[in-house]
Image: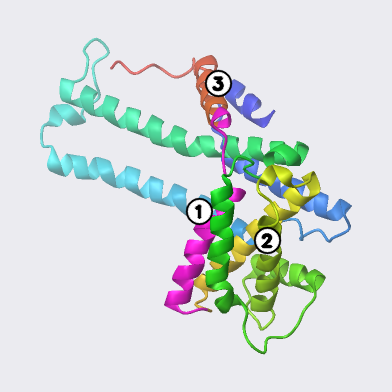
């Protein structure tokens, strides 16, 4: 409704900001309804990175857009290139060529980047409504599942620390949730991470295909994979492990994450077609079309 209203009135609006705000609202409301606390439904550290990008990127764009014309005036001395074009005469060929090339580049890069939010939103809906079909990449080859199990054995020595405190599964889940959200490392993180990773390996070791899992098991495995991925990322960022161990953990993440992080080709195609149709159906009649 917000997008259509702003388009109709010719007002500039950011769909990305709208989508981010709506996802935050859904997460907080779900957490409140589930009696988990208002703040537990949002990954705040990742949200902080996103908000920083939203704040910094317009400043960078504004500054670059202001400096580029100044640079052009220094490099190109022909004043014809810097004067407004005539209503009856087309701009010089070089200017038209540059405009076409840069506008094409902007359209391609913006579309390939901005379309990701539509793809992400569709996947969120699919995973929420049909977790049995979309929580995991069900077509993952059995060889890849075996590779994850083998890769886990290579990082067990990093996660299983001698003399570490013993914790139960519920505590491990709670500890990793807190660590994923805050990034605050303590003595319980590695034991919790080891227990969670062992659960993933145990699940994958007993099946030949992800289709063998029940709907509940698929959802749990997806949650566990993302929890391990975020926790390992925090470990490497805070230098809690050495360089060699960090490299081994990063390689293991690259093998593990494709189970849950994937995008069907039909979703890509649907978003691309929808965006193209929306732009074609929503012209801006109040703006004068460029003469080129």
Q: Secondary structure at mark 2?
A: helix
* 51, 109: nearer the viewer: 109
The answer to whether residue 261 of the structure is visible from this angle is no
> Image quadrant of residue 287?
top left
Q: Position of residue 35 (x, y in %)?
A: 89, 58
Mark count: 3
Q: CA distance from mark 2 to mark 3?
A: 42 Å
**Residue placed under numbered mark 2 in the picture:** 200
Rate crowding at label 3 as few (under 14), some (14 to 19) or many (20 or more) other CA atoms within 10 Å: few
Q: Look at the picture and state if 224 lies above or below 79.
A: below
For marks 2 and 1, give the one nearer the viewer: 2
Q: Position of residue 16 (x, y in %)?
A: 57, 40
For marks 2 and 3, give the one nearer the viewer: 2
> Residue at 58% of width from left, 36% of height from top?
119
Q: Position of residue 71 (x, y in %)?
A: 21, 45
In the current view of this chain or complex, which residue is farthest to the bottom? 163
| Part of the protein shown in magenta | 241-267
Q: Earlier in the sequence, mark 1 or mark 3?
A: 1
Q: Is residue 209 magenta?
A: no
Q: Earlier in the sequence, mark 2 or mark 1?
A: 1
| Contact between labelled residues 3 and 1, with CB atoms less than 8 Å apart | no
**Residue placed under numbered mark 1 in the picture:** 53
């Amino acid at each position: 409704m917000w997008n259509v209203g702003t388009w109709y009135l010719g007002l500039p609006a950011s769909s990305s900001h709208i989508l981010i705000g709506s996802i935050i609202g859904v997460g907080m409301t779900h957490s409140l309804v589930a009696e988990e606390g208002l703040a537990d439904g949002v990954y705040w550290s990742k949200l902080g990175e996103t908000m920083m990008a939203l704040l910094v990127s317009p400043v960078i764009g504004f500054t670059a857009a202001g400096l580029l014309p100044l640079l052009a005036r220094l490099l190109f001395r022909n004043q014809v290139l810097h004067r407004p074009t005539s209503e009856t005469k087309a701009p010089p060929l070089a200017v038209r060529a540059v405009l076409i090339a840069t506008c094409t580049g902007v359209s391609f890069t913006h579309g390939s980047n901005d379309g990701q939010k539509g793809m992400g939103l569709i996947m969120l809906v699919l995973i929420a409504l049909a977790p049995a079909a979309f929580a995991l990449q069900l077509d993952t080859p059995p060889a890849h599942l075996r590779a994850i199990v083998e890769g886990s054995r290579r990082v067990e020595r990093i996660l299983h620390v001698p003399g570490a405190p013993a914790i139960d599964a519920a505590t491990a889940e709670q500890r990793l949730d807190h660590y994923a959200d805050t990034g605050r490392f303590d003595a319980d993180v590695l034991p919790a991470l080891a227990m969670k990773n062992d659960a993933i390996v145990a699940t994958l070791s007993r099946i030949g295909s992800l289709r063998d899992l029940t709907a509940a098991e698929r959802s749990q495995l997806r949650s566990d994979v993302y929890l391990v991925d975020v926790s390992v990322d925090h470990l490497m960022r805070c230098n809690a492990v050495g360089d060699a161990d960090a490299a081994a953990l990063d390689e293991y993440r690259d093998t593990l994450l494709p189970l849950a992080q994937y995008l069907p080709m039909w979703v890509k195609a649907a978003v691309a077609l929808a965006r193209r149709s929306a732009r074609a159906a929503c012209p801006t009649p109040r703006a004068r079309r460029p003469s080129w």
